[in-house]
Image (tube, helix red, strand yellow):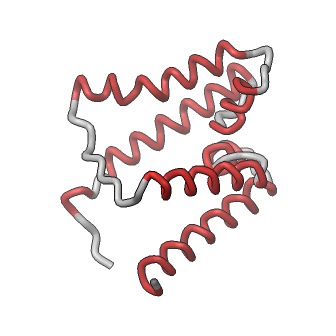
Amino acid sequence: MQIDLAHFTPIASLIGGAMIGLAAGLLILLAGRIAGIAGIIGGLLTGASDKNWRILFMAGLVLSPVIWRWFAPLPELNMVTSPVGLIVAGLLVGMGTRYANGCTSGHGICGLSRFSLRSLVAVVSFMSAGFVTVFVIKHLI
């Protein structure tokens, strides 16, 4: 394995992770809500009564790259799959999110910080599946 040191950004990654943790912590402390994207979008689609904060949260996710672009260039986007591959991947992620009762952000960031056993099992499961998938694609196929 070789690390691309030109694109190795530990400081920016640390700051970004701290900001995500701060935002998730503030959301649960101030609003009593978990910052899991699947639950936030699910609440918007199922007609939850508390839509305002969900809309603002999603707007922040969409507008963040736009604001970032004012200060620095966005990273280059390099798609290495077909539109069909993206659709299949999206459906598989959606199914996994449904089966796991939450997404990676909900379980990995919010669930683990609350010492949720269900989240620990989910994180171990999807990380293991990711490791196996990368190994198979990179080394066996």
Compared to 22, does 47 lie above or below? above
Compared to 105, does 80 lie above or below? below
Compared to 25, does 11 lie above or below? below
Relative placement, left or right, of 64 versus 105 is left
At horizontal 69% and vertical 29% (from top left) the residue drawn is 28
In the rendered view of the protein, which quadrant contains the N terminus? bottom left
Q: Where is residue 39 drawn, in percent x and y?
A: 72, 35
Q: Where is residue 131 drawn, in percent x and y?
A: 54, 72
At horizontal 57% and vertical 76% (from top left) the residue drawn is 132
The image quadrant that residue 81 belongs to is bottom left
At horizontal 64% and vertical 63% (from top left) the residue drawn is 126
Relative placement, left or right, of 118 versus 58 is right
Q: Where is residue 46 drawn, in percent x and y?
A: 78, 26
Q: Where is residue 99 drawn, in percent x and y?
A: 78, 54
At horizontal 79% and vertical 20% (from top left) the residue drawn is 48
Task: Return the residue nearer the eye: 15 or 81.
Answer: 81
